[in-house]
Image: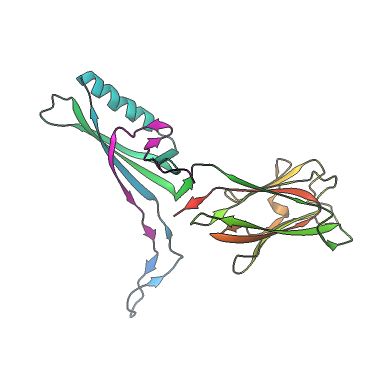
Amino acid sequence: MPSLTHIVSFNGYDLTDVIEQHSDQSNTRVQLQTVPKRHGALLTDIPVLDVRKIQLKGVIYGTTQDAVRTKIREIEAALGFTRGKLKLFSDRFYWAWKTDFSFSYVPSTGMLVAVVTMGFACDDPFEYDEAGPILVSQILTTGDTHIDVTHGYYRKQFTIHYTGTAFVYLYIVVSADQGVALTEVLIRNTSLSPSRQESYTAAFGGLSGIVNAGTSLIIDGNFFTVQNNGIDDLVNWQGVFLWLQPGDNVIQIEGNPATYQLQYNLKYV
């Protein structure tokens, strides 16, 4: 594990030398409804994390008034109007939007010192590992467990040890690179309670839902999309988009021989 370093930046713009303090607000959105003649309230929906709010405060020192003003405008421009990576330490980041920016000159400094405050809203309230996505690759072959002689389906099982603290959806690429078309792609996470699975299956009468040899099926659990050779094909998919939970996740892949690539980011709450 890399050593931890205090680094503050947004969209690659380094604020470390400016920022002196930050605050972090993480609320839970709880939907409650009062009921006549009943104490307390009724929970009407599953509690979820609300937008995370982060505020940074720092000081700009300059040798001239123009230098201070220039630095203020430079920071303001860098924060911009787009979603970006907000880093408070070297190993993790949030996806955030700048919501507010303000500054004030410190009295009796000849406008050579200014206090800046900036606020951010994280629409995705979770923190992500800066190291980037982790890729797990498995090849389903004719040497694995043969479960369907008629259609040539096989099954393989393996374990992914997920070290994040919040569940994370999978980005899955199934490549028909073993010389055959795919008429079934089935993926299970048997460690979830109850066990969950997603599948892409051919309707043999009309032969829809076929992943032709040499092409790929992409199942994106982050955006809930399914593409067959680059074309939307959610109609032939069923089940739930799979996720990993903290700890060991026992994964089963099933269908025709193919290469399975499961990609995810470490995610923290």
Residue 50 in percent (x, y) is at: 40, 55
Name the residue: 47% across, 43% down. Answer: 2
Quadrant of the rendered structure where residue 95 is?
A: top left
Q: Which residue is more in the foreground, 6 or 33?
A: 6
Res. 220 visible in picture: no
Q: Which residue is more in the foreground, 84 or 140?
A: 140
Name the residue: 41% across, 40% down. Answer: 86
In the image, taking residue 70 as reference, residue 266 lies left or right, namely right
Residue furthest bottom as drawn: 37
In the image, taking residue 195 as reference, residue 216 lies left or right, namely right
Whether residue 155 appears in magenta in the rendering, the answer is no
Total marks drawn? 0
Look at the picture and state if 132 lies above or below 146: above
Residue 198 in percent (x, y) is at: 68, 58
Res. 249 visible in picture: yes
Q: What stretch of residues is rendered in magenta?
A: 1-30
Residue furthest right as drawn: 150
Look at the picture and state if 104 lies above or below 3: above
Name the residue: 18% across, 25% down. Answer: 112
Quadrant of the rendered structure where residue 230 is?
A: top right
Residue 110 in percent (x, y) is at: 13, 24
Whether residue 19 appears in magenta in the rendering, the answer is yes
- Quadrant in the picture for the C terminus: bottom left
